[in-house]
Amino acid sequence: MHEMSIAMSIIDIACKEALKDGAASISSIELEVGKLAGIMVDSLKFCYDSVCKGTLAENSKLVVNELPGFAKCLDCSTQFEVDSFMALCPQCESYAIEVYQGRELRLKAISVNE
Ligand SMILES: [Zn+2]
């Protein structure tokens, strides 16, 4: 499962960071996930809860900030919110758009217990 491997790599990175800081455990991990990243947030949280068992992140909280998708029209430069890559410009109805936000999967912050 896609979300399972994402959860595993997030926890892997966070645990390495926490170890480097000499932390006793991780209390929460904050993520930024774009709406167009193709990630099911509920599924990711579910996987996270099972993957974190037995690691420094056990019983920690996964906080997900969802970022909306944004695109820019290459013909008229209008910027607008999109919920798919196949959107068209609301101003000139061009399909020549560039999605510049919404694909993110970013580990934003790790909170640890000293
Ligand atoms: Zn346009």
Image (cartoon, grey):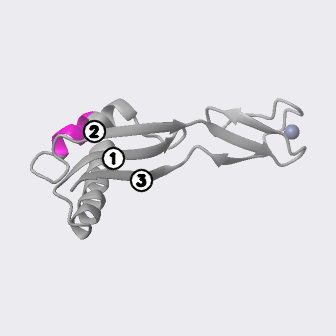
Label 3, on which residue? 107
Distance CA(mark 3)–CA(mark 2): 13 Å
User: How would you rate the neighbour count of disc 2 (Cα within 10 Å): few for under 14, some for 14-19, many for 20 or more?
Assistant: some
Left or right, residue 59 beside residue 93? left
User: How would you rate the neighbour count of disc 1 (Cα within 10 Å): few for under 14, some for 14-19, many for 20 or more?
Assistant: many
In the image, farthest residue toward the left: 54
Q: Measuring 28% from the left and 51% from the top, which residue is drawn there?
A: 5
The magenta segment: 46-51
Name the image quarter holding the C terminus: bottom left
Check disc 1 and give the amino acid type. Answer: Ile
Q: Quadrant of residue 85?
A: top right
Q: Measuring 67% from the left and 37% from the top, which residue is drawn there?
A: 86
Q: Is residue 17 above or below residue 34?
A: below
Check disc 3 and give the amino acid type. Answer: Leu
- Mark before the other along the chain sequence, 3 or 2: 2
Nearer the camera: disc 3 or disc 2: 2
- Mark before the other along the chain sequence, 1 or 3: 1
In the image, farthest residue toward the front: 114
Q: Are marks 1 and 3 in contact (CB under 8 Å)?
A: yes
Label 1, on which residue? 29
- Mark before the other along the chain sequence, 2 or 1: 1
Left or right, residue 88 beside residue 43? right
Left or right, residue 67 beside residue 22? right
x then y, percent, for residue 45: 30, 35
x then y, percent, for residue 31: 42, 46
Q: Are marks 2 and 1 in contact (CB under 8 Å)?
A: yes
Q: Quadrant of residue 90?
A: top right
Q: Nearer the viewer, residue 68 or 114?
A: 114
Label 2, on which residue? 61
Q: Quadrant of residue 56?
A: bottom left
Question: In the rendered structure, does residue 53 fall within the stretch colored magenta?
Answer: no
x then y, percent, for residue 7: 29, 47
